[in-house]
């Protein structure tokens, strides 16, 4: 995306940050850079980067930002953060395959659950559905647990994000298999997957009330690689709108499925000898690191109807 923006005459620069740190701290660092960036600045932010940008815009001296284009930003969180804390997220499980003795559960409990940013990404409000994921009692008693101080700090930090205004515009990924709800059942989390999101962020979480949206049938990680999305971003930066992507989206799909933490723990369990992999095998392993397991979604009631016809 950066190269595309530069090729179209926009002086795009990266703002690197350590994604493990709190969004509030990262926003402070971005705000400091913005204060010296000149009189006219636009931000294009992907995923958690959108929360970092909102944290920065809440601080003094950032009024030079004229546009904020948000790509798949989880304003109300992502269930990927829940699975990372539980040790069932695909990335955690694949990293554990490379470790000599560590398991995904031990990595989650000892390493991933110590990252403040994961708690900034926990689903909240409408994003969490009926489960209050900032209440420790809502989590299963067995398996890796969240850290209460980090949860409370993240919840307080959300209140300090800049509210949306006319500078904001969003591109929302849709029609991908996405966890859009979680329930606790028999001391286990059970996740519901639908096509109401980009594979990582539910569409309902990527939409901000009052903010103009464009919708793309693109997976979360590809929002910064897709050529149509890139062209739409250029339009938004120059004109504040685009005709390349629809401004409305109504999903006709009722297909869904459910999967539990217990089931997810059966995936990516076999160790990988990194030294024994060929360069191509290593490339594919890293390329697919963020790839979630593919589950077959079904329309409720169709299997029962087929059995009746037989």
Image (cartoon, rainbow, N blue to C red):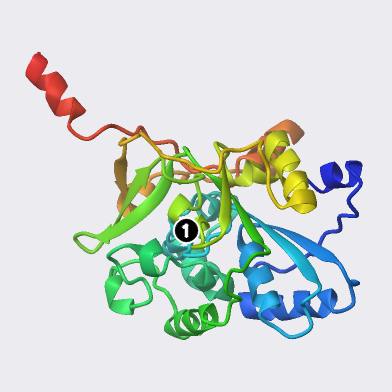
Taking the view exactly as shown, the residue that stands out farthest to the top is 310
Dot 1 falls on a residue whose secondary structure is helix
- 245 versus 46 height, above or below: above
User: Would residue 114 appear left or right of 13 to someone viewing this image?
Assistant: left
Residue 128 x/y as whole percent:
37, 64
Q: Which image quadrant for residue 194?
A: top left
Residue drawn at (66%, 36%), measured in percent from left and top? 244
Residue drawn at (92%, 46%), measured in percent from left and top? 9
Residue drawn at (88%, 42%), measured in percent from left and top? 8
- 272 versus 119 height, above or below: above
- Which residue is more in the foreground, 206 or 80? 206
- 186 versus 227 height, above or below: below
Residue tagged 1 = 205
Please count the marks in the image.
1
* Residue 20 visible in rendering: no
User: Would residue 171 appear left or right of 196 to someone viewing this image?
Assistant: right
Residue 32 x/y as whole percent:
81, 80
* Residue 142 visible in rendering: yes
- 161 versus 210 height, above or below: below
Considering the image in quadrants, where does the C terminus appear? top left
User: Would residue 1 appear left or right of 188 to someone viewing this image?
Assistant: right
Badge 1 local density, few (<14 within 10 Å), some, or many (20+)? many
Considering the image in quadrants, where does the N terminus appear? top right
Residue drawn at (55%, 43%), measured in percent from left and top? 247
User: Would residue 8 appear left or right of 222 to someone viewing this image?
Assistant: right
- Which residue is more in the foreground, 263 or 233? 233
- Which residue is more in the foreground, 147 or 157? 157
Residue 255 x/y as whole percent:
31, 35
Residue 115 x/y as whole percent:
57, 73
């Amino acid at each position: 995306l950066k190269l595309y923006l530069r090729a179209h005459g926009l002086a795009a620069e990266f703002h690197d940050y350590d994604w493990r740190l709190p969004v509030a701290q990262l926003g402070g660092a971005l705000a400091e850079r913005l204060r010296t960036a000149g009189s006219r600045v636009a931000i294009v932010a992907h995923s958690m980067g959108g929360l970092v940008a909102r944290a920065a815009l809440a601080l003094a001296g950032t009024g030079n930002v004229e546009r904020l284009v948000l790509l798949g930003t989880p304003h109300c969180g992502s269930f990927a953060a829940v699975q990372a804390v539980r040790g069932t997220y695909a990335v955690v499980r694949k990293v554990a395959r490379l470790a000599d003795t560590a398991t995904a559960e031990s990595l989650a409990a000892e390493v991933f659950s110590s990252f403040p940013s994961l708690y900034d990404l926990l689903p909240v409000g409408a994003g969490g559905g009926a489960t209050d994921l900032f209440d420790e009692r809502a989590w299963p008693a067995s398996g890796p647990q969240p850290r209460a101080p980090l949860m409370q700090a993240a919840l307080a930090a959300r209140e300090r994000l800049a509210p949306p205004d006319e500078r904001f515009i969003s591109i929302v990924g849709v029609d991908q298999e996405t966890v859009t709800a979680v329930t606790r059942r028999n001391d286990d989390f059970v996740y519901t997957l639908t096509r109401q999101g980009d594979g990582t962020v539910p569409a309902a979480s990527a939409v901000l009330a009052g903010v103009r949206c464009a919708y793309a049938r693109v997976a979360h990680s590809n929002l910064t690689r897709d050529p149509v999305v890139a062209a739409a971003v250029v339009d938004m930066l120059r004109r504040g709108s685009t005709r390349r992507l629809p401004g409305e989206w109504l999903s006709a799909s009722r297909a869904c499925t459910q999967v539990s933490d217990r089931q997810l723990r059966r995936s990516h369990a076999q160790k990988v000898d990194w030294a024994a992999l060929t360069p191509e095998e290593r490339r594919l392993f890293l390329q697919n690191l963020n790839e979630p397991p593919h589950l077959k979604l079904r329309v409720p009631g169709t299997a029962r109807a087929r059995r009746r016809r037989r």
